């Protein structure tokens, strides 16, 4: 279930489910692109992503942040199935990076990051909705070609 609101000079989309629940990946990508288009965000400039080679095998998985919504901090759990360069960032609804939480090489395993609602400078940011975006850069096993995939995006609400 979801809700879309358009009033005066703002737009909002609220989903009662995670984008990970939309299968297969092509349908998830189409849905997400349509949401960004409705929000007047240029899909080409904001996000680029490629499908994971196998939908049934998650290369990385972003789990639901908790608590969500949050006041002081939120824990963002995720799992990495293959070694590679992992980036976990918080973006505003226009796709601008607010905070880099993780930007490092990780091996297979379960991880988490904690976001305190502050930007890169350490300043508190406004209450509202933010995306948490998880990407993995790795090499394809058969060809050695580099692949960058945005595998998961979650919506996070900061309350003040």
Image (spheres, rainbow, N blue to C red):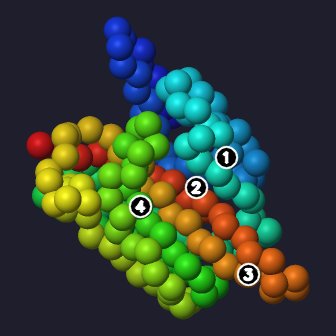
Rounded to the nearest whole Å, what is the CA distance between mark 2 and mark 1? Answer: 8 Å
Label of residue 20 in the image? 2
| Distance (Cα) linking label 3 and label 1 | 24 Å
Q: Which residue is mark 1?
A: 28
Label 3: few (<14), some (14–19) or many (≥20) C-alpha neighbours in 10 Å: some
Pointer 3 or 1: first along the chain: 1
Q: Nearer the viewer, mark 3 or mark 1?
A: 3
Closer to the chain start, of discs 2 and 4, is 2
- Say whether marks 2 and 4 touch (CB < 8 Å): no
Q: Residue 24, position in %: x, y?
A: 74, 53
Label 3 and label 4: CA atoms lie apart by: 21 Å
> Mark 1 or mark 4: which comes first in sequence?
1
Q: Classify the position of the C terminus by image quarter.
A: top left
Badge 3 vs badge 4, beta-carbon distance below 8 Å: no
- Specify few, some or many for label 2: CA neighbours under 10 Å numbering under 14, 14-19, or 20 or more: some
Q: Which residue is mark 3?
A: 139
| Picture disc at residue 74 | none
Q: Are marks 2 and 1 in contact (CB under 8 Å)?
A: yes
Marks 1 and 4: which is nearer the front?
A: 4
The residue sitting at 32% across, 59% down in the picture is 99
Q: Secondary structure at mark 3?
A: strand
Graded by Cα atoms within 10 Å as few (under 14), some (14 to 19) or many (20 or more), the crowding at tag 4 reads many
Question: Is residue 56 among the parts visible in the rendering?
Answer: no
Determine which residue is flagged by label 4: 89
Marks 1/4 in contact by CB < 8 Å: the verdict is no
Q: Position of residue 108 (x, y in %)?
A: 56, 89
Q: Position of residue 130 (x, y in %)?
A: 36, 46
Residue at image point 19% right, 40% down = 126
Tell me the distance, in whole angstroms, between the alpha carbons under discs 2 and 4.
17 Å
């Amino acid at each position: 279930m979801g809700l879309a609101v358009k009033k005066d000079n703002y737009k909002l989309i609220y989903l009662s489910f995670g984008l990970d629940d939309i299968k297969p990946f092509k349908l998830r990508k189409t849905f997400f692109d349509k949401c960004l288009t409705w929000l007047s965000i240029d899909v080409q400039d904001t996000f680029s992503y490629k499908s994971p080679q196998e939908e049934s095998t998650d290369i990385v998985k972003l789990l639901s942040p908790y608590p969500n919504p949050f006041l002081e901090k939120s824990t963002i759990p995720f799992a990495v199935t293959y070694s590679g360069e992992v980036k976990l960032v918080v973006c505003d609804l226009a796709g601008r990076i607010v905070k880099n939480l993780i930007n490092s090489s990780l091996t297979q395993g379960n991880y988490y990051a904690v976001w305190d609602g502050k930007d890169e400078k350490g300043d508190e940011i406004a209450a509202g909705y933010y995306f948490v975006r998880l990407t993995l850069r790795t090499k394809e096993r058969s060809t050695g070609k580099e692949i960058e995939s945005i595998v998961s995006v979650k919506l996070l609400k900061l309350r003040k």
